[in-house]
């Protein structure tokens, strides 16, 4: 990879700005000052430093975001802010994208990465990756809803869902529940409740596969996955 591309990818500025760094003799490769921005380097074996600070080159970025309401799970949008707009420029350099979609008004766990293979594995219907949601429901959620979700319910387009595991946290005219599903149809949780005559008034994703929302993240905040989180997601 070209040295200027590597440094630009790692957030050291535009290629033009990187050229300036090289001019200032700020960049070394294996300890030697380099001035040629087109030099090819192998970040796996060569040690690149900027003003003495080692550049830890990584190709992939893995972020956990606590998605806030009001932003779109997409890389760009003509009208609304996207989850990518919430990232700092350093993270945006990696051209990450959200793994799957949460509705604009849904909050909670969102994985953001540029690892297409991982994204594919997590979203593939064949992999049955469970996703758990917390929701507030207008209406009394009952044992018969638990049974219905266990059997699978028919959505407005005729699709019959795979079994979902519904846990009632509190029941009354307004109920609180947790629902685990292994699919990701459009508006699935909201439509499942519609099919039993109830309305989701608040929805938050708590987990996806082994990845659990870090509740210490404020709405709109994000952090890199820990090594353990990443390992268990990949395995
Ligand atoms: N189900 C929904 O209805 N909305 C979401 O955002 C996620 C799952």
Image (cartoon, rainbow, N blue to C red):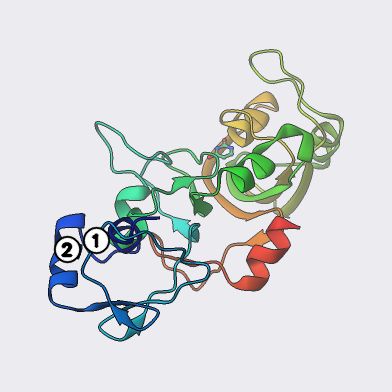
**Neighbours of disc 2 within 10 Å: few (<14), some (14-19), many (20+):** many
Residue 7 visible in the snapshot: yes
Element assignment for label 1: loop
Residue at figure coordinates x 48%, y 64% from the top left:
58
Where residue 19 appears, x then y in whole percent? 17, 63
Specify whether 73 is left or right of 70. Answer: right
Residue that protrudes farthest toward the top in the picture: 158
- Is the residue indicated by label 2 positioned so its CB lies within 8 Å of ligand 1? no
Task: Point out which mark residue 78 bears.
Answer: none
Count up the numbered dots.
2
Please say if 180 is above or below 218.
above
Element assignment for label 2: helix
Question: How far is mark 1 from mark 2, CA to CA?
Answer: 6 Å
- Is the residue indicated by label 1 positioned so its CB lies within 8 Å of ligand 1? no
Q: Nearer the viewer, residue 157 or 9?
A: 9
Q: Nearer the viewer, residue 11 or 78?
A: 11
Specify whether 163 is left or right of 25. Answer: right
Task: Point out which mark residue 37 bears.
Answer: 1
Choose top left, top right, bottom left or bottom right for residue 116.
Answer: top right
Specify whether 140 is left or right of 50. Answer: right
Q: Are marks 1 and 2 in contact (CB under 8 Å)?
A: yes
Please say if 192 is above or below 158.
below
Residue at figure coordinates x 54%, y 44% from the top left:
99
Where residue 93 appears, x then y in whole percent? 33, 54
Where residue 137 appears, x then y in whole percent? 59, 43
Quickly name the residue at label 2: 19
């Amino acid at each position: 990879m070209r040295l200027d591309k590597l440094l630009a990818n790692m957030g050291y500025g535009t290629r033009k700005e990187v050229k300036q760094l090289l001019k200032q003799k700020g960049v070394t490769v294996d300890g030697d000052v380099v001035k040629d921005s087109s030099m090819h380097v192998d970040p796996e074996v060569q040690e690149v430093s900027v003003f003495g600070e080692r550049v830890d080159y990584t190709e992939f970025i893995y972020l956990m975001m606590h998605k806030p309401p009001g932003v779109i799970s997409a890389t760009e949008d003509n009208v609304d802010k996207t989850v990518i707009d919430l990232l700092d420029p350093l993270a945006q350099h990696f051209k990450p994208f959200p793994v799957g979609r949460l509705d604009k008004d849904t909050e909670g766990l969102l994985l953001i990465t540029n690892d297409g293979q991982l994204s594919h594995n997590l979203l593939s219907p064949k992999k049955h990756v469970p996703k758990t949601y917390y929701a507030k429901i207008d209406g009394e959620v009952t044992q018969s809803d638990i049974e219905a979700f266990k059997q699978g319910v028919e959505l407005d387009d005729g699709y019959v869902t795979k079994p979902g595991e519904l846990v009632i946290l509190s029941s009354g005219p307004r109920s609180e529940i947790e629902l685990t599903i292994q699919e990701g149809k459009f508006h699935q949780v909201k439509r499942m409740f519609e099919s039993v005559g109830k309305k989701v008034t608040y929805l938050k994703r708590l987990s996806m596969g082994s990845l659990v929302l870090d509740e210490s993240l404020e709405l709109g905040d994000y952090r890199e996955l820990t090594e353990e989180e990443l390992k268990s997601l990949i395995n």
